[in-house]
Image (spheres, rainbow, N blue to C red):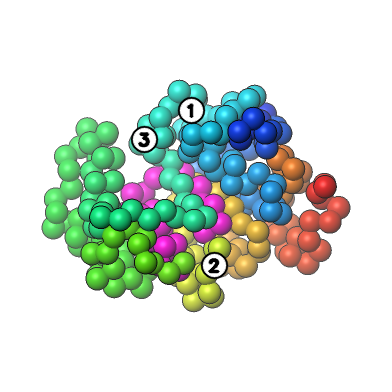
Amino acid sequence: MKLLELRGLAASVDEKQILNGIDLTVNAGEVHAIMGPNGSGKSTLSNILGGRDGYTVTEGEIELMGAPVNGMSVEERALTGLFLGFQHPIEIPGVTNMEFLKVAIDSHRISLGEEEMNTRDFMVQVRDISKRLELSTEFLKRFVNVGFSGGEKKRNEILQLMLLQPRLAFLDETDSGLDVDALQVVARGINEFRSDENGVVLVTHYQRLLNYVNVDFVHIMINGTIVKSGDAQLAHEVETHGYTGLGEA
């Protein structure tokens, strides 16, 4: 099943053209990596998929789980099965991790016509996932991302991912700012999440995350378009030779 399809996608930010015609298909069971230098449009693509204000599709089409996203609100995209991981996760003062996670999972269940999750079952599940991600139970009582280290913020996103079980995870520089120990924990969470029923897109500058997460496809984005695609070996070539000769300005 096609989880995400981009056809000729072009987009602008504050009337400045950033994306210049992207074609990409992500099927269930696949893990894709998008690599590229700074300013190539990777984060813009993430924001376009999420429906962020100020980011405008100027040409092309986006389909999520077979449905066009035009006119979908941010909430509708999430309930359709899209999960975004951010390069710089925002802080939410006054809202604990536990409260945030419970509201998120109940919103998804209600959208599917299901009852809210029993609090005891929810606590058991969250604590189990937290343990696997090396997060203490005290962490769940803290306000979302407030005072978190970079590694804690990224592990917190993977906790959300594993709990919500979306159809498509689009993770924007999840490896940014992580030391090797935190990177391995995050990668372990991604590997636990992946299945034949869902898909993952990893946006990254570097090959190092791909040492721990096996990918099916690697795409190189430069100047707002995908200039080359291949298998995991392409990431090693970029690590060795850089983006020289691949179309960068």
Is residue 245 in view?
Answer: yes
Where residue 63 sits: x, y (%)?
A: 52, 29
Disc 2 residue type? Gly
Q: Which residues are magenta?
A: 151-174
Question: Which of the pair 112/58 is nearer the observer?
Answer: 58
Disc 1 residue type? Val
Where residue 78 sits: x, y (%)?
A: 39, 38
**SS under mark 2:** loop
Q: Nearer the viewer, mark 2 or mark 1?
A: 2
Vertical order, 113 against 246 (above or below): above
Q: Which mark is residue 177?
A: 2
Q: Earlier in the sequence, mark 2 or mark 1?
A: 1
In the image as oriented, which residue stretches furthest toward the bottom?
181
**In this figure, which residue is indicated by the disc labeled 3?**
75
**Horizontal side of residue 248 vs 111, given as left or right:** right
**In this figure, which residue is indicated by the disc labeled 1?**
69
Where residue 93 sits: x, y (%)?
A: 30, 56
State the image quarter where residue 19 is shown. top right
Q: Residue at x 81, y 63 (%)?
A: 241
Residue 55 shown in magenta: no
